[in-house]
Amino acid sequence: MTTISLDVQQPHRKWPDKRPLRVALVGNPNSGKTTLFNRLTGLRAKTSNFPGTTLERRAAKIKAGEHEIELIDLPGLYSAHFADQSEELLAADALHGRLKGIERPDAVVVIVDATCLSRHLYLASEVREMGTPMVVALNMIDEARKQSITICLETLGKELDATIVPISGRTGEGIDALRDAIADDLAGDEAIHAKRAEAMTERIACTSCSSCPHTNRHTWACGVGEAAGEQVSEVVERRTEKVDSVLTHPFIGLAFFGVIMYALFFLIFRAATYPMDMVDAAFGSLADAAAGVLPDNLVGSFLVDGVIAGLGGVVIFLPQILILFFVLTLLEDTGYLARAAFVMDRIMQKVGLPGKAFIPMLSAHACAIPAIMSTKVIESRRDRLITILVIPLMTCSARLPVYAIVASLAGMILYPGEANSWERAILGGGLFFGAYTLGILAAMLASFILGKTILKGKPQELVIELPPYRWPSLRVAFLTIWDRGIVFLKQAGTVILLLSIIIWAAMTFPQLPEDKLADVAKPESVMLLADYEAQIETAKASGDTDAVEAAQAEIDNMLARYSTEYAVGGRIGKAVEPVFAPLGFDWRIDIGVVASFAAREVVVSTLAITAGIGEEGADDDVLLRDTLAAMKRPDGSPLFDLPTLLSLLVFFVLAMQCLPTQAVTKRETGSWKWAVLQFGYMTVMAYAAAMITYQVASAVV
Amino acid sequence: MPTAANNSTNSPKKADEAIGPVPLTGLPAGGTGLVMRIEEDDHAMLIRLKTMGMHEGRRVRVIRAGSRIIVSCGGTRIGLAAEVAKHIRVAPTA
């Protein structure tokens, strides 16, 4: 197909400075804009934010003719003038150059869907009236052909007064012609576009006599669409409706959605395990190698335990993020996600959230971080904020080691002896199920309350376009996850790394030198220490290297234990003991709680260290369980009795103990105040619930 | 306001007239109608509906009825909540 250009000979426009020219890409949602943008830019696209906002801006530098241009992808817009949602409003402002620090684009490429002409012409006509150079990309021309739709380019070209380029973002057809058209337009005379804008306004005003500007423009668009050969394919319509009769059915649709969500959840959970283990192993080896090379001092510890461990702690989130976004992008591309939002809306509205909020909340059960990142799709800022604030309440994979140790210890108390393994398994399952349910109920309650207090307002009522079903593009999915991965590493990753180093510092400083060990250790420990040292002497004399190593390992564990208490983190744990006493915790548990505010699973290894069996002890399930079960309070009663276990479980279900999540919350909301609120309300909730659990359980048991 | 499509919205039509405007929720699945007016106080919602193609003079066809409705409107399928749809007045056709 050939491009239709305008006949007027245009003088070459001189651009004054050497800066790259700004070209904005606009179009309705579901018009294939992202696919086209990816076609034109590939891996060169960089995602950043419009200054002062959380609106994402994807841009890339490409060449069009002899011009170097910066192609900017704006979020989908139904109208350039009338936008109600904050993101669309920002996008419209960006288009008109009203955003602080952003200039008007030098040219605009408007995407029009050849299979659904008139609605897209609405936006195209508005852009024409802006008076900037404009090129129309008539997208999905391959689909139109398949549906036997022929669009008259001349009619369109005349009515829109712009160059029309038929393209297919999917197959790549017409992309070169599009680039040429952009170059040509940029070379044209400025004044012409102002004239064209005026002519456009007149044309629309003449079409109908309604005083409502929307109706006028729609009427014009319908008229032009018809004249240009717009058709709705009966076959496609019927096929879509048939599928929809199942997928949007209140019950069957819900069940189908349940299956899809289970599959997604399972994928994130399971498939991510392999790459996550690989990341763990890789960073572990790196740390070992570095420890071997670096001096055994502060710098060495900083690099190994602070930086390398911190970096590992960032990269480990990538597999789950990438898998989630890959699947979601595919699902969205097919058009299914709109149906999912439709089907979930009724239930979600009962807790004050829109249907779209469900998918992020479900994937939070694997990890809150990708879930928070995926709340982008929720248009209303209020709804989005509430969803982000409550997401961390859902049980994520990091809490599972804590649940496991609690279940294991509880099993030993209630059903001691090997014969009762069946009962212990049922108890364990019950505790896990209870924990997951508690998280979900807490999230529903929190959304309800937040929605009536701090984030007052109604959830956005459902008005959603259900696009025709399409085959998804793997290319778009891969480019999306590449993009998301880089954004995460650059923005959230740096904060997470910084916070990990701070926690490392809190758990390391001040340091306990080995010779001071005897000064701070308890009397029994001092005796043990003397014992071990004697063992080393005898073993050395008899050449028994294994015994030397074993005794030295015991000394190292003791050193680790007292170092932890000696450091800032440990002292905080001891200092807050009275605060957590009503929950049944003692200072050893408190140190674990303090450490786990960085990352939840750390509590298990910290407990192992404070119990004196060292970090390796945490890997030995039986040893860990038995050691913890034997820990005693000052009055001789066991530390981990049933009420304490239950209150510990409840605390870990509800507490905000994940600095990486807070970093991502800050990034996605644009401000630390929401992260602080998140931390605040969850901590209060966790404390109160755990205290009630402990007091009630103590009275009952 | 009179539109090109019909000229009767200005005259006071009573509910007991033969075919008066009904809320969109009043149409059954498969039913079609012509949008007469949208009685929505929430400006943001009004804008949203109009820019998506739901405006006076538009023909709509109900694909699914219930508490969540799907209508076909100008080549686009739109899903909306009944709370929103009930503010859209249509004149049933056929």
Image (tube, rainbow, N blue to C red):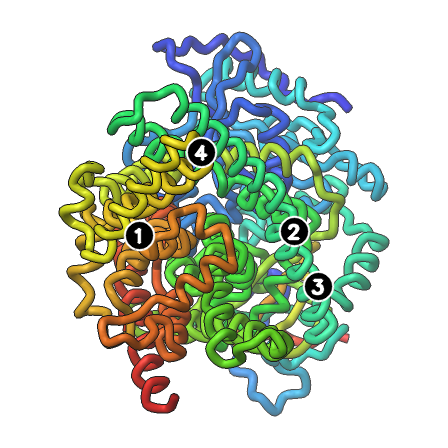
Between disc 3 and disc 4, the foreground one is: 4
> Marks 4 and 1, how far apart in space?
38 Å
- Identify the residue under disc 2: A267
Q: What amino acid type is highlighted by mark number 4?
A: Asp
* Badge 4 and badge 2 in a common chain: yes
Q: Badge 4 sits on which subunit? A: A
- Secondary structure of the residue carrying tag 3 is helix
- Label 1 sits on residue: A595
Residue that appears at 54% across and 35% down: A281
Q: Chain of mark 1?
A: A
Please, is residue A552 above or below residue A599 in the view? above
> Of callouts 3 and 4, which one flags the residue occurring earlier in the amino acid sequence?
3
- Sequence-wise, the earlier of marks 4 and 1 is 4
- Give the number of the mark in front: 3 or 1: 1
Residues under labels 3 and 1: Cα distance?
Answer: 38 Å
Mark 4 lies on a secondary structure that is loop
- Front position in the image: A617 or A380: A617
Q: CA distance from mark 3 to mark 2?
A: 12 Å
Q: Amino acid at mark 2?
A: Leu
Q: Amino acid at mark 3?
A: Val
- Indicate which label's residue lies in the foreground, 4 or 2: 4
Q: Position of residue A336 (x, y in %)?
A: 68, 55
For label 4, the residue is: A544
Mark 3 and mark 1 residues within 8 Å of each other at the beta carbon: no
Where's residue A293, x and y in %?
39, 19
Identity of the residue drawn at 49% across and 40% down: A316
